[in-house]
Structure formats: C-alpha cells, structure tokens
Image (cartoon, helix red, strand yellow):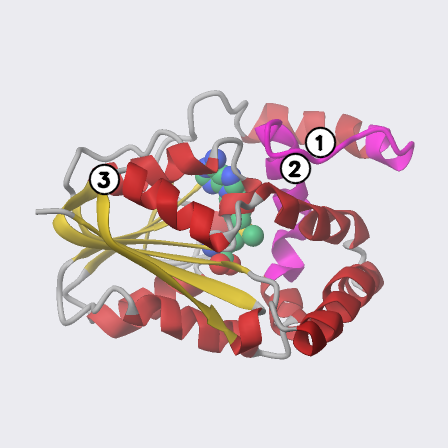
Amino acid sequence: MRGRPVAARPEGTTGHRVDRGTAATVRLVAERGQEEIRPDDPGSIRRMFRELAPDYDRLNSVLTFGLVHRWRRALVRTLGAGPGGRYVDVCAGTGMSTRAVRRAAGEEAVVVGVDFTPEMLERSDGLRVLGDALRLPFPDGTFDGAISSFALRDIADPVASLGEMARVLRPGGRLGILEIGRPRSALPRAGFDVWFRGAVPRVAGAFGHRRSHDFLVRSVRYLPPPEELCRELERLGLVEVGWRPLTLGAASLFVARRGT
Ligand SMILES: C[S@@+](CC[C@H](N)C(=O)[O-])C[C@H]1O[C@@H](n2cnc3c(N)ncnc32)[C@H](O)[C@@H]1O
C-alpha cells in the first residue's frame, strides 16, 4: 500500500501547502548560498529530505555499493523478531528498514514507521505515522522492538530521541541503531575517507544532490564516538548495551535492551 501517510502532521510543522511555498523561498535563498542545513533547524532537515526523497533509495545503494541492504539486515537481526510482535522504525524515511523488519517479523506483526518528512514517508508502505522522533506519539511500553537507521545525525537532540525510543519499548524490548561509521585501522580508514569525504558528495552532485551530501559528510561530526553513545544508552537505563563495526567500520550497529 503506497500513498500518503494517514496520521496528522507533527507538531510545529507547517503542513504541505504552506511548506511548499516556504520551500520555494528556501530554494531561492539556497541558490544564493545562504541556507544552512543544521540538525538544530528541523525545517532545514525536512526541506533537504523533501528534495532528496525521489532519489534517496537509489543514491543509498549506489553510494554504499549495495552494502546498505546487508547492514539493514544486520540491524533487523538485533531485534530477534520472530513471527508477530510490535515494532517501530523511528525516522523511517522511505521505509527500507521498516520493510526489512516486516519481512523478518511476518504479516501478523505490527510494524510502524515514523518520520517527519511526508515526502520520504509517502514512499514507504504499511503503517506510517508523521511524527517527531523527539516526541513519539505512542504510550510508554508499546513496542517489542525499536530501530532507527542513519538518522541520529539529523536530529537536534539525538540522546533525547534515544530516550524516546527507550520509553516506548516494553520491559525487555530491544533497541537497534544503525549509523555511519569510520574504520579505525589506518588503511581502511584512508580508503573510507577518500570515498566518503571526497567522492560521495561529487557522485551525489551528479544526481543533483550535492548540498545534502555535503551535509551528510559534515553531519558525522554530530555523532558521539561509539563508546560514548553506549554510555548514553546506559545512562538512559538501557541494559545489555553494545556496538560492533560493520564492513571494517564503515557502519556501526548499536544494540540495547530495556531492563525488566
Ligand atoms: C538519512 S534518512 C534515514 C531514513 C531511513 N531510516 C533509512 O535508513 O533509509 C533520515 C530521516 O530522518 C528523518 N528525521 C530527521 N529528524 C527527524 C525528527 N526529529 N523526527 C522524525 N523524523 C526525522 C528525516 O525526515 C529522514 O527521513
């Protein structure tokens, strides 16, 4: 079932009609080189993803040489999703990870994707809610598992969003977070840097998405190192916290569980 998500737009957003008008102005400003994309300006993040949405999935596959699909499967495995259960994908975007959860958990599972950019979410399918990761529209303890992929860097307060994910997990529920990483050994790191910092913005530029990928490269700075992120998860009261590098460290997978 493709099409527009059913739920109300998130608080603080201006909605489709007004937002489109704003987008034209912002594009104009951006062309003059004045708009800055910043996580603490959620409007700039939404506008970036609105423009990127039609090419998002294709670019992700191209820029990761298809590895992104393998990383998503690793993320979903952390949920240990059997048949059935309730799962939420926070900042679900076009639903690539949401679908992977649905495939793992089967038809009887309830799998919800949440995102605040309608143009991303409408490319997904199944249950979708337009909502803010910083104020998830679900009661405490709703889900057996919560995931988020490649989104923490885009959120004004990533730790608060992790807190929201922890809140909506039932006791014993599992959390999985997938993020861009950076290899730690010298040789893979050098290769990664050449590709990620040098080539990725240029390749994306060939698709007309240079600005968003300049932001992508810059946004890695907003992520704490993996060990620090694990400490934040523990401070949130989560247990069995851990992380591991994927593909020599090009991506990082974080896992945790809500205590019983
Ligand atoms: C890089 S995309 C990742 C999409 C998807 N998770 C994936 O793995 O392909 C980041 C997504 O986070 C969403 N996002 C960023 N900040 C958000 C927030 N505060 N609340 C909800 N969605 C947000 C954006 O709209 C965008 O769709």
Start and end of the magenta stretch? 28-56
> Which amino acid type corresponds to the residue marked 2 in the rendered image?
Arg
Residue 134 inside the magenta-drawn segment: no
> Which amino acid type corresponds to the residue marked 1 in the rendered image?
Ala
Secondary structure beneath dot 1 equals helix
Numbered circle sitting on residue 237 = 3
Q: Residue 163 location, x and y as percent?
A: 32, 36
Q: Residue 185 location, x and y as percent?
A: 63, 73
Q: State whether residue 74 is above or below residue 221.
A: below
Q: Main secondary structure of the magenta part?
A: helix
> Residue at image x 37%, y 67%?
75
* Residues under numbered marks 2 and 1 in contact, where contact means CB atoms less than 8 Å apart: yes
Q: Rounded to the nearest whole Å, what is the CA distance between mark 2 and mark 1? A: 7 Å
Residue 52 inside the magenta-drawn segment: yes
- The first of marks 3 and 1 along the sequence is 1
Q: Nearer the viewer, mark 2 or mark 1?
A: 2
Q: Residue 152 location, x and y as percent?
A: 49, 45
